[in-house]
Image (cartoon, grey):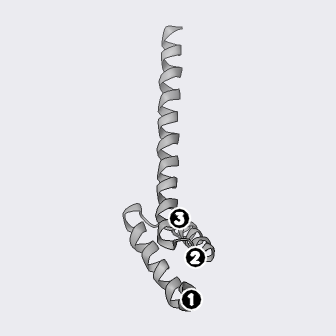
Amino acid sequence: MDYLIIAIATLSGLYFHWWLFVRIRRWTDRDLALSMAGEDQAWRAYMLASLAEAKQQKVRRKDLEGWLRAAAERYESKNPEELG
């Protein structure tokens, strides 16, 4: 019975740490995308959509910043009058 309790506690702890790790990675990716957009709500929505597209295309994490910067540059070139 002692081994069962230890196993359950260990597995629960491992699951919690994995879940927290995944959540922090999602938060940092979202923060990266939003930091490139500033306060413009349309740009923020575009960057979040770009982040979702990057996830769908399975862009590697180390390439994500460059991919998002390219997406931000595409937005800037399409909407220069909105940037004021």
Task: Give the foreground label among 3 and 2.
Answer: 2
Residue 8 lies, with reference to residue 63, above or below; the image says above
- Residue drawn at (49%, 78%) of the image: 71
Task: Name the amino acid type tagged 2.
Answer: Trp
Near-viewer residue (75 or 58): 75
Say few, some or many: other residues with alpha carbon within 10 Å of mark 1 (under 14 / 14 to 19 / 20 or more): few
In the picture, which quadrant includes the N terminus?
top right
The first of marks 3 and 2 along the sequence is 2
| Contact, mark 1 vs mark 2 (Cβ under 8 Å) | yes
Residue 58 visible from this viewpoint:
no
Task: Name the amino acid type tagged 3.
Answer: Lys
Q: Please tell me whether mark 2 sits on a helix, a strand or a loop.
A: helix
Say few, some or many: other residues with alpha carbon within 10 Å of mark 2 (under 14 / 14 to 19 / 20 or more): many
The residue carrying mark 3 is 55
Residue 35 lies, with reference to residue 84, above or below; the image says above
The first of marks 1 and 3 along the sequence is 3
Near-viewer residue (80 or 48): 80
Say few, some or many: other residues with alpha carbon within 10 Å of mark 3 (under 14 / 14 to 19 / 20 or more): few
Q: Please tell me whether mark 1 sits on a helix, a strand or a loop.
A: loop
Residue at the outermost top position: 1
Q: Which numbered tag is attached to residue 43?
A: 2
Task: Name the amino acid type tagged 1.
Answer: Asn
Q: Position of residue 75 (x, y in %)?
A: 53, 83
The residue carrying mark 1 is 79
Mark 1 to mark 2: distance in Å? Answer: 9 Å
Q: Please tell me whether mark 3 sits on a helix, a strand or a loop.
A: helix
